[in-house]
Image: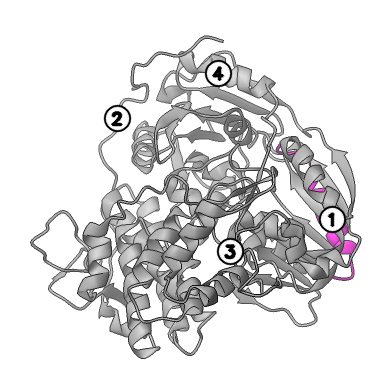
Amino acid sequence: MAYSLLRIRKVSPFGISRVLQADKASLWRFHLEPECAQFLRFGVFTRNYGKILGSSHYDFTGSGSTSSFDFTDLTCPHTWYPIARRKKRKVILHVGPTNSGKTYNALKQLERSSSGVYCGPLRLLAWEVAKRLNKANVPCDLITGQEKELVEGANHKSVTVEMADVTSVYDCAIIDEIQASLAFPLAEEEIRQLTMVGCKQRGFSFTRALLGIAANELHLCGDPAVVPLIEDILKVTGDDVEVLTYERLSPLVPLKVPVRSVSDIKTGDCLVTFSRKDIYRHKNTIEKAGKHLCSVVYGSLPPETRTAQATRFNDATNDFDVLVASDAIGMGLNLNISRIIFSTLEKFDGTETRDLTVSEIKQIAGRAGRFRSQFPVGEVTCLHKEDLPLLHSSLKSPSPIIERAGLFPTYDLLSRYSQAHPKLGLYKILEHFVENAKLSSNYFISNVEDMMKAAALVDELPLKLQDKYLFVVSPVDINDEISGRGFAQFAQNYSKTRVVKLREILSDDTVKVPRTPTELKELESIHKVLDLYVWLSLRLEDSFPDREVATSQKSICNVLIEQFLEANRLISPIPFSSKKLRSRRKF
């Protein structure tokens, strides 16, 4: 049994209720009060968010009175973390390309430590490290925004970076993939999955961990491009800094010829493209040729499904021997890839269609040829000959130096600003900080465009600032129609009764395997709503009591998505060599 959103008039093929509206453009409608519905239906947040960036978590630090304290002075963020400042940390930077062993060596030190924490950018990485440590007889808790698995006797934790505890003291800590995602921006659907020190959206979480984790040894793993910035930031902390440089463990060979047709695809290939539509089209084209079956990986797939797809591709005993993926493979998954094939070196980044950056190309290409795998020598090429010069020049170039790290004010500053300006809602408070923050040259205010949208909505509800803040920092995809409306209904029901029961929002229906990519996307959105409920239930347990039900329904969604991916219910194929004619600059 599964659940459909809202018990109303029409049901989709897998049981998700749809409200019939005069406005036929939108299939999904939640039962919202008029003022909240207006924000999602029309309000559309026409404000210019060009300068609005970032989010934060609960750091109750700082001092001063509301009458004289300059809330917008963010020039000394290292002082927000007094526990870390009382320690003289030994900071070791492990820097090098993909497949160079930098994280492996840091984890070895974590295993030997008496206590420690691993902080990763993705749930997949946190899961993998927790599993590795427990297998090595080092009891390790797993803590992410949606999971909390405690192991008896554990002195180690594996967490997503937003969950890093800056109030505890550790013998050893690791922050993985700390390089800036300005050098590796993701597709819009994946942007909330990844958070790094220079990331416009959520980079402040890595900055918080860098400045705030109190450990005798702090190991940072990433690209050499981040070294000058980290060294400069840590000059004021009194930490000792050491840089260890790594070389790639296996060769990566850029090919001189493109892959011209589907007949050139071979076992171990990964075809990289940048839209879910093209992922399914290429999958269908390859499978129609009859020689290979494809696994798929992209950002909006649930993490459990991505892991299952990767496992199936890595298993040499089954027939799924080709991977079609987005740039979500850039980190978080161990993949036995022989050859990376770029379908294009252009992508839409949420604002414009542009060439991939040097860092993006290197990060993705580097996934080929995993050390000691079935394919120890990696190859990389393109579908189109005109893309080869950019590919080759990028692989020869160093990644651009990262100049600034993301930053955002602590909750304590936001709270005290609210006390001084009690008539302002959270939206106006965030706006004030973004527009007036005083920063040193090492920092920029992280992008909180989505947070501002969420804040505008919750400001319409009778909620305390702390409750508003909690909803705003939740992992909602506010730009997704279904996910955004689930968020709105959760917040509205909570504001009315302080208890949000899943069955009041999702009605009982029998769900089915989606038949088209469009139906699949809807099911993925339902998974996001359930994921959001679980996240809220871990923080407001009494108010969101149906965590087990939500977790169960997430599992059903995962099974149905997997069944779709294994089936041949795909749209008609496109020619493998199809492309848009465009000019390519010369190198």
Mark 1 is surrounded, within 10 Å at the Cα level, by few (under 14), some (14 to 19) or many (20 or more) other residues, namely some
Lateral position of residue 378 relative to residue 415, left or right: right
Numbered label attached to residue 103: none
Helix, strand or loop at mark 2: loop
For the residues carrying marks 4 and 2, which lies nearer the camera in this image? 4
Disc 3 to disc 1: CB gap under 8 Å: no
The quadrant in which residue 358 appears is top right
Q: Position of residue 291 (x, y in %)?
A: 43, 33
Q: Residue flagged by tag 3: what amino acid is it?
A: Ser
Q: Residue 114 lies in magenta, yes or no?
A: yes
> Viewer-proximal residue, 188 or 383?
188
Residue under pointer 1:
237
Q: With respect to residue 92, does 141 lie above or below?
A: below
Q: Residue flagged by tag 4: what amino acid is it?
A: Leu
Helix, strand or loop at mark 3: loop
Disc 4 to disc 2: CB gap under 8 Å: no
Q: Position of residue 546 (x, y in %)?
A: 43, 85
Q: Residue 35 lies in magenta, yes or no?
A: no
> Viewer-proximal residue, 383 or 42?
42
Lateral position of residue 86 relative to residue 176, left or right: right
Q: In which quarter of the image is the C terminus?
A: top right
Residue range in magenta is 97-115
Residue under pointer 3:
56
Q: Distance between the residues labelled 2 and 3?
A: 44 Å
For the residues carrying marks 2 and 3, which lies nearer the camera in this image? 3
Nearest to N terminus: mark 2 or mark 3: 3
Disc 4 to disc 1: CB gap under 8 Å: no
Residue under pointer 4:
390
Numbered label attached to residue 574: 2
The quadrant in which residue 280 appears is top left
Nearest to N terminus: mark 3 or mark 1: 3
